[in-house]
Amino acid sequence: MIHSTSSIDKSVSWHRFKALLISAGLLSLTFANPVLAQEKMMRTLTVSGRGTEMVATTISQVRLGVEAQGKTANAVQQEVARRSNAVINLLKARQVDKLETTGINLNPSYQYDNGKQTLTGYSASNIVSFRIATEKAGTLLDEAVKAGASRIDGVSFIATDEAIAATQKTALREAIQDAQAQADAVFSALNFTKGQIVSIQVNGASAPPPRPLEDFQNMRASAASKAPSPVIGGEQEVQASVTLQISY
């Protein structure tokens, strides 16, 4: 069979046109896929949940020390050293934890009269900090005063590291449940289908600074009495927050 040149050209042109259409379709799909993928990724809900737990404070963080005044720097320093050694030996005997020196001071004392400065003596102090079970803190403070301590700079209450770590995990679980509950409420209200969690961000799980004991004056006064100084701990708050990104 003999085909004319015109027919062959038309056939070739048609095949080329179909190829161009197919190629254009493929290109169109190629360009559309990233857009669809991006749109799908943008369909997410971001929610943040919080969890709060309380943990018992069973440890007392104590700062106490010795201070003295006298006519000469040498005499004052020797007196502070003598009494400080007695206090530190007591604390070591009671096996307190994290015992360390936090301050040593020696300062001149002056008297001012009609603009004239006169040296009257010296004052010195030696401050230590330590941790002890709160149930033992009152008795130990009384013993420290008898051993030579003359100032109590601070008492604060904290939980053990193990108790805080366990409570942080519980607070984190609460934060996740809170975030998921918020997401469920939103999806239900909008009649959307909840998808997978595509991102998790733990914003933190921490405990605030130790709670201080405020009434030091009463504690100093009771230290001189026969009854043990009352030292009662409380609870420490542990917080956690989590951010979830959920597809739909």
Image (spheres, rainbow, N blue to C red):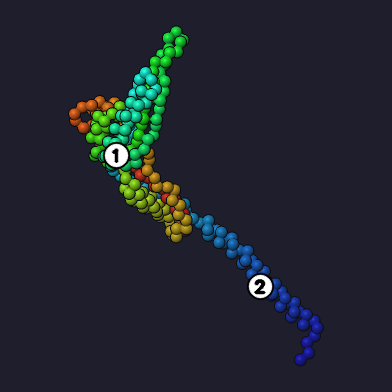
Vertical comparison of 242 with 76: above or below: below
Q: Where is residue 164 in the image (x, y as percent from the top left)?
A: 34, 47
Q: Position of residue 230 (x, y in %)?
A: 23, 33
Q: In this view, does 235 lie to the left or right of 246?
A: left
Reading the image, the residue beneath label 1 is 92
Q: In which quarter of the image is residue 159?
A: top left
Asked which secondary structure carries label 2, the reply is helix
Q: Is residue 174 left or right of residue 37?
A: left
Q: Does any portion of residue 211 appear in the rendered image?
A: no
Q: Where is residue 122 in the image (x, y as percent from the top left)?
A: 39, 20
Select label 2 or label 1 by which is in front. Answer: 1
Q: Do the residues labelled 2 and 1 touch (CB within 8 Å)?
A: no
Which residue type carries mark 2? Ile
Residue at (25% x, 35% y) in the render: 140
Vertical comparison of 14 with 231: above or below: below
Q: Which of marks 2 and 1 is nearer the N terminus?
A: 2
Vertical comparison of 59 with 142: above or below: below
- Can you tell which mark lies on residue 78? none
Which residue type carries mark 1? Lys
Reading the image, the residue beneath label 2 is 22
Residue at (39% x, 32% y) in the render: 103
**How far apart are labels 2 and 1 at the CA level?**
87 Å
Q: Is residue 90 left or right of residue 198?
A: left
Q: Quick one: 242 or 47, which is closer to the camera?
A: 242
Residue at (29% x, 39% y) in the render: 92
Q: Quadrant of residue 26?
A: bottom right
Q: Position of residue 40 (x, y in %)?
A: 53, 60
